[in-house]
C-alpha cells in the first residue's frame, strides 16, 4: 500500500499514487487503465510493470479514481479531495485497487452508481468483443456497456489510437451526448441501415473540435474528436451566488452535431434536430408560402429568400442548445428564414428580425458575416428572446424583468424607452414593442 502524497509539482497541488493488485504474469498490466475524473479533469494513467500509477499536479477540488481491466471485477470509484494547500482527504489512505478475474465461461454484467459520472461496471463475455471490418481493415472496438450501446444504436466504433484510449468515462459521455441529439438510429435487423464510423480521440488541436473523413462510396467515416471536449461534458452540481445549478460545457455536443448533420450539409438531419429539439423548421414551403408567411410583415415572395448556409445552421443549432432546456421550444416560434445574400430587409437595417406575431425569425447575410462567435451567439439568443417575452413571461415577470433591467420611459428615445444597463438580453425595441405602459 502506498501513502498519500501531499506534495505536487506546483505549490498548492497534490499527487495521487495508486497500486493495482490481483493480476500477475507477463504483460498483465498492459490493458489496465486508471481513470481520474473531476471538474475540468479527465485523465488516464497506465500502471508500470509493478502495478503502480500516479496522477500529478492536482489542484484543489474533488476527484474520483477508478481502475479497470477487461474481464476483471474492480472496486467502485474512490473519491478524494485536494485542499487549497495541497492536503488530501477522502476515503482513508487506501489507494490499493484489487482486481479479481471473472469466470471466462460465464456471462457477467454488473453496474451500480458510484462517485464517477459513468458509474461502476464490469463484465465477462462468453463471446469475444466484435471486430469490425472497416474500409477493408480490421479494428477491435473498445470494451464496455456504453461502447456496445454506441455500436448497436449508432454504428459507432470506438478505436484506441495514438491520440488516446477510450475509457468507460469517455464512452459514457459520448453516448449521453448522442442520445440527446435527435437522429436516426441503427435498425438492428439491417446492419448497414446507418453508415459505420470509427471514432478516435485526438490529443492535438482540431478545428471545431472534430474532423470527419467520409468515404464517398458508402458514407463510412473516420472521426477524430478532441480529447478536450470530454472534460466538462458531464453536468456537475455547482454553486453560483450561493444557489445550486448544473455546470457543464457543450463542446462535445457541438462537435457531435457537426457529425450528425455532416457539418450542416445534411438537411434531413438538421431539420430533425430543429423540429424535435426546438420546434422550428427552415422548410417554409412545406407549411405555407412565403407570401402567406410575410403577409403581415414585409409581404414578399420566395424569390427574396434562400436556404441557410451549412455553417449558419450549425451555429443556430448550437446556440439554441446553449439556452436552458425550458427555452428550447417556445410557443409561437415556428420558422427560421434566411434572406438572399446581399439583400437587406426593406424595413430595417438590423442583421436579424424577430416577427413574433408571424412566428418567425429572419436572418440577413450580415448576421453571419461578423467573425466574432460571441456576436453571432448573442444575436441569435437576442432574437429568440423576443419570443420568450411575447409567449412565456407573464405580466408579473415582465414587470420584474423591466425593473431588473433598469428600463424607464424616455421621450427622447425613438423607441420611448432607455436603460443604463446596455448588456441585458432585451433592448428598448423589445420592451417598447410589448410593454407599452410604465411598469
Image (cartoon, rainbow, N blue to C red):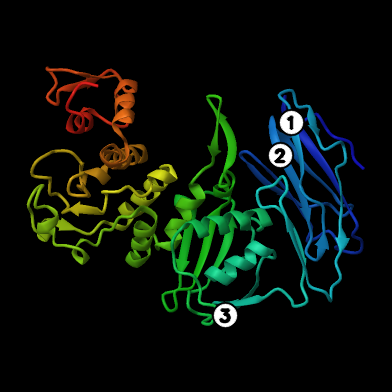
Cα–Cα gap, marks 2 and 3: 42 Å
Mark 2 and mark 3 lie on one chain; the one further toward the N terminus is 2
Q: Which residue is mark 1?
A: 82
- Drawn side of residue 371 relative to residue 145, left or right: left
| Residue 258 seen from this side | yes
Please identify, in this view, whether the residue under mark 2 or under mark 3 is nearer the observer: 2
Dot 3, crowdedness within 10 Å: few (<14), some or many (≥20)?
few
Q: Secondary structure at mark 3?
A: loop
Cα–Cα gap, marks 1 and 2: 8 Å
- Pointers 2 and 3 in contact (CB under 8 A)? no
Whole-percent x, y for residue 160 in the image: 65, 62
Viewer-proximal residue, 271 or 432?
432
- Pointers 3 and 1 in contact (CB under 8 A)? no
Q: Which residue is mark 3?
A: 136
Q: Residue at x 58, y 34 (%)?
A: 238
Q: Secondary structure at mark 1?
A: strand
Location of the C terminus by quadrant is top left
How many marks the image carries: the answer is 3
Cα–Cα gap, marks 3 and 1: 48 Å
Q: Which residue is mark 2?
A: 63
Amino acid at each position: 500500500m502506498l501513502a498519500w502524497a501531499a506534495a505536487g509539482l506546483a505549490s498548492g497541488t497534490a499527487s495521487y499514487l495508486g497500486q493495482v493488485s490481483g493480476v500477475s504474469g507477463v504483460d498483465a498490466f498492459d490493458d489496465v487503465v486508471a481513470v481520474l475524473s473531476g471538474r475540468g479533469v479527465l485523465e488516464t494513467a497506465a500502471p508500470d510493470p509493478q502495478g503502480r500509477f500516479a496522477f500529478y499536479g492536482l489542484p484543489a477540488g474533488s476527484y474520483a479514481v477508478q481502475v479497470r481491466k477487461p474481464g476483471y471485477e474492480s472496486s467502485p470509484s474512490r473519491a478524494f479531495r485536494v485542499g487549497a494547500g495541497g492536503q488530501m482527504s477522502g476515503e482513508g489512505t487506501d489507494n490499493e485497487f484489487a482486481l479479481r478475474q471473472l469466470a471466462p465461461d460465464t456471462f457477467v454484467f454488473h453496474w451500480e452508481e458510484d462517485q464517477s459520472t459513468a458509474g461502476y461496471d464490469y463484465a465477462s463475455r462468453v463471446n469475444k468483443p466484435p471486430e469490425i471490418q472497416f474500409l477493408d481493415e480490421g479494428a477491435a472496438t473498445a470494451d464496455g456497456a456504453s461502447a456496445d450501446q454506441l455500436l448497436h444504436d449508432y454504428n459507432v466504433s470506438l478505436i484506441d489510437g495514438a491520440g488516446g484510449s477510450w475509457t468507460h468515462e469517455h464512452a459514457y459521455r459520448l453516448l449521453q451526448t448522442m442520445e440527446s441529439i435527435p437522429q436516426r438510429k441503427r435498425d438492428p435487423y439491417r446492419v448497414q441501415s446507418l453508415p459505420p464510423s470509427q471514432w478516435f480521440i485526438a490529443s492535438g488541436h482540431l478545428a471545431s473540435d472534430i474532423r470527419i473523413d467520409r468515404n464517398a462510396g458508402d458514407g463510412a467515416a473516420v472521426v477524430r474528436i478532441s480529447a478536450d471536449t470530454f472534460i466538462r461534458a458531464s453536468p456537475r452540481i455547482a454553486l453560483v451566488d450561493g444557489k445550486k445549478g448544473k455546470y457543464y460545457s457543450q463542446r462535445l455536443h457541438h462537435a457531435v452535431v457537426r457529425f450528425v448533420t455532416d457539418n450542416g450539409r445534411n438537411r434531413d438531419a438538421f431539420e430533425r434536430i430543429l423540429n424535435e429539439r426546438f420546434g422550428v423548421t427552415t422548410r417554409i414551403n412545406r407549411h405555407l408560402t412565403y407570401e402567406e408567411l410575410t403577409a403581415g410583415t414585409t409581404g414578399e415572395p420566395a424569390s427574396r429568400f434562400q436556404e441557410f448556409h451549412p455553417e449558419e445552421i450549425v451555429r443556430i443549432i448550437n446556440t439554441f442548445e446553449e439556452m436552458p432546456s425550458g427555452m428550447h421550444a417556445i410557443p409561437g416560434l415556428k420558422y427560421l428564414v434566411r434572406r438572399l445574400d446581399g439583400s437587406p430587409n426593406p424595413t430595417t437595417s438590423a442583421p436579424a428580425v424577430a416577427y413574433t406575431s408571424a412566428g418567425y425569425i429572419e436572418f440577413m447575410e450580415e448576421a453571419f458575416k461578423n467573425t466574432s462567435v460571441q456576436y453571432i451567439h448573442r444575436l441569435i439568443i437576442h432574437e429568440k428572446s423576443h419570443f420568450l417575452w411575447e409567449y412565456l413571461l407573464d405580466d408579473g415577470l415582465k414587470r420584474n424583468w423591466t425593473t431588473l433591467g433598469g428600463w424607464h420611459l424616455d421621450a427622447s428615445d425613438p423607441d420611448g424607452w432607455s436603460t443604463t444597463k446596455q448588456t441585458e438580453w432585451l433592448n428598448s425595441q423589445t420592451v417598447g414593442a410589448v410593454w407599452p405602459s410604465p411598469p
